[in-house]
Amino acid sequence: MVARNRLQVFGVLLALLTVIVGPVVYAGFNDLHDAQSAVSEKHFSDAMNLFESAARKLFWRSDLWEKAGLAAYSNGNQENSIRLLELSRQKNSLSPLGWNTLGIDFWVKGDKASAISIWKSALQLYPSFAPLYDQLIVAYHDQGDYAAEQDALTKRLALGEDAVAHYRLGLLLTLSDQQRAEQEFNAAASLDPQFKSVVKTLVSALITAGNDPNLARQYVVIGRGLGLVEEWGLASISFDKAVYLDSMNAEAWAWLGEARQQQGQDGSKELDRALSLGPRDAVVHALRGLYWKRQGQFAKALAEYQLVAEIEPDNPAWQVSIGESSALNGDLIFALSSYQKATSLAPEDATYWRLLAMFCSDYGVSVQDIGLPAAQKAVEIAPNDPQVLDALGWSYLNAGYLYNAEQNLLKAIKVEPDLALAHIHLAETYLRKGDRASAFNELENARQLDPIGPSGRVASQLLNQYFP
């Protein structure tokens, strides 16, 4: 009898629970279904809200908190992404992807220490999840913790081949094991052809350095190679090694000053030391000229380049530097003569004819009688060079030949679709023709191709000017 009464009570309670909880559970599954549909339609804001609602109703589905956080991340909602993923972490339900995303959120927020801590914690749980190493590698490189970066790279490559990891490991090894560094670079290039160009630069630097018996000079050459691929943190270490080994090496001090500037420091003390050690060193004066140019001291930059030209009178590059500094200093006549002298020193090099043509068009100096013929000469020498074709198109435009300008700029873009400057020049051609729609498209292309570079900035300015 007692047992029967208990069963009746249990049945009543179960019925009540079904009446009370059933609709909530049903609504939760509806929210989950709608959330999944929202994700497939890329409505991530709706998906975030629906996943969170489902997680509250389906309390045993702790995985839904992560789904809500990932939807917030996909929507660019960093605050909610962190909140929801942290909730998931508290419930011990974060997947490797969730851990990785939470770390990215903190990194983007600027809390780099927390980001690194999260990725390291995640690797203790998921040591075979390669993207966690990928994030840590970038983080350690950003922090200049090269020992930790090298350790992470080694562990990352133990999980499988990766071109980026081979390349980054090669960069670190340039300062300690050049032979192995070359092997890593070649591995990167064989896995991904996009690394071939930078690998060629770096391997060439390693070979050149290896042929020099002087260890200090070896580090200067390696540092220059690293600088050419924009690895100025490592380059600075290489130049530091050079001046430690040979404190009288003027070029090592000059390059160390350049590396300091590239890292947001002043660098003038190193450049002054270089000048005291090498008052007639062309590299020293060239890098000092670059320093003064960055400072906006164009007269001082010009003086440095003129000294370089005295030391190396047959080098056309110094005449271009003199021309550029003279133009920035307001002396267009002297600038023009310097660019022309560069072409006379290297009459079969298309580069200097192109630079003369660009100067004439950029400053509106003798475009018809000097600039356009210079561009045509450059095309004779290098008919398939996209930068040369761009210079010819730009010269035609500034000389008033719109059809010829358009045709040559289209050729340049066909050869190199990612040449942002050619897109800008083509946009200006369309503006003069009155084709605003095409001009807008070309400016947008340029801005996307070079979002933080000089061409991207010019494109943005023109878009604001003509399409406010």
Image: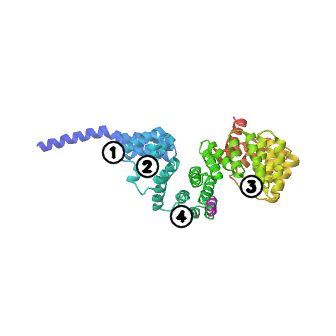
Pinpoint residue 152: horizontal percent, then vertical percent: 46, 55
Left or right: 74 as drawn, with respect to 210: left
The magenta segment: 201-208
Residue that mark 2 sits on: 119
N-term mark: 2 or 4 = 2
Tell me how far mark 2 sits from mark 4, CA to CA. 28 Å
Residue drawn where x is 48% and y is 54% of the image = 147
Name which quarter of the figure residue 212 lies in.
bottom right
In this rendering, does residue 457 appear at all? yes
Residue that mark 1 sits on: 60
Residue that mark 4 sits on: 180
Disc 4 marks a residue whose amino acid type is Arg
Residue that mark 3 sits on: 386
Label 3 neighbour load within 10 Å: few <14, some 14-19, many 20+? many
Pick out the residue farthest to the top.
468
| CB-based contact (under 8 Å), mark 1 and mark 2 | no
Tell me how far mark 3 sits from mark 4, CA to CA. 36 Å
User: In the rendered view of the protein, which quadrant contains the N terminus?
Assistant: top left
Disc 3 marks a residue whose amino acid type is Pro
